Amino acid sequence: MDLELAGKSVVVTGGGSNIGRAIVLQFAEEGANITIGDIDTASAEKVAKLAIERGAADAQVVKTDVTSIDDVNALFNAATSKYGSLDALVNNVGWDNLMLFTETTPEFWNKVININYVGVLNCCKAALDIMIPQGTGGSIVSISSDASRQGEPREAVYGGVKAAINSLMKTLAKENGRFQIRCNAVCPGVTIPADDEVGNESMWTNKDAMFNDDQLAKVAKMLPLKKVGRPQDVANPVVFLSSAKRAGHITGQVLSASGGYSMIG
Ligand SMILES: NC(=O)c1ccc[n+]([C@@H]2O[C@H](COP(=O)([O-])OP(=O)(O)OC[C@H]3O[C@@H](n4cnc5c(N)ncnc54)[C@H](O)[C@@H]3O)[C@@H](O)[C@H]2O)c1
């Protein structure tokens, strides 16, 4: 199925690791022009090189902290200056440190809210400021989490912020549908990278601190599909939703790619 993303200009935040890396490589197979915004340029450059080997029209890396509006504006300027347009944004950056809410501090709440929510607000604002006057429609997909759809122990602040992202995508879908700009959210469940898919700044640099082997086996057993996710499981629906040709009548949706963990109909 041709997604007609060849030559399109796409921005992926956090493309240097795990899910973002798989999204970049899937866009590469579709022949897109890819701009990766990541704080970790060393890991992102490796992914950009691989993207070109896998068929990207081109790929560039811009050092970006998504919590900084100046960095984000520079990221989107780089995409439009080099590739002439902005067709799709994937808000992939996210961060958490699993712990009970009673163990968290206001400093921790601020960090979670800034990286996971302010970063998305910054990127959506910058993208819409380009897409609306450009007049050729566009797509925004934000990576949320199944923690947003049902309470998840040790993910209280993060789950709440991801629920805010789902709501934001629905509102932006309603406000910008008249410009043919589609906004959707994709919710992974536990999604595990291989060692060579982990960036230097990834949450997964110490995998056991996130989920040890016993916990992963329990998660897999509990899921309807009996396996934990791999980054490609999330990249597939994200890239599909970014295609105006194939997903052009889908907007304001929250889609789980989580092995059936949550089933919200
Ligand atoms: N992996 C999972 O199990 C899982 C589950 C549910 C949701 N998610 C969501 O999926 C997305 C990707 O998760 P992942 O596991 O691939 O993460 P990861 O930690 O492996 O990668 C995150 C990437 O973002 C970059 N980054 C971090 N902070 C940044 C910032 N302030 N500005 C720019 N770049 C920054 C990192 O350098 C890294 O390349 C996140 O939004 C996460 O919340 C992941």
Image (cartoon, rainbow, N blue to C red):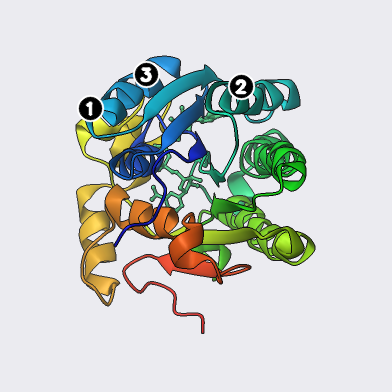
* Residue at (65, 37) in percent of width and height: 108
The image position of residue 56, as x and y in percent, is 33, 33
* Count of numbered badges drawn on the protein: 3
The residue that label 2 is drawn on is 81
Q: Amino acid at mark 1?
A: Glu
Label 3, label 1: how many angstroms apart (C-alpha)?
13 Å
Vertical comparison of 96 with 77: above or below: below
Q: Earlier in the sequence, mark 3 or mark 1?
A: 3
The residue that label 3 is drawn on is 45
Q: Front-most of 151 and 26? A: 26
Q: Quadrant of residue 182?
A: bottom right
Secondary structure beneath dot 2 equals helix
Q: Amino acid at mark 3?
A: Glu
Label 3, label 2: how many angstroms apart (C-alpha)?
19 Å
Circle 3 residues within 10 Å: few <14, some 14–19, many ≥20: some
Vertical comparison of 110 with 189: above or below: above
* For residue 64, side relative to residue 171 (left or right): left
Q: Quadrant of residue 46?
A: top left
Question: Quick check: can you spot residue 24?
Answer: yes
- Disc 3 or disc 1, which is closer to the eye? 1
Vertical comparison of 103 with 111: above or below: below
Q: Earlier in the sequence, mark 3 or mark 2?
A: 3
Q: Quadrant of the N terminus?
A: bottom left
* Residue at (29, 57) in percent of width and height: 229
- Disc 3 or disc 2, which is closer to the eye? 2
Question: Quick check: can you spot residue 153?
Answer: no
The residue that label 1 is drawn on is 53
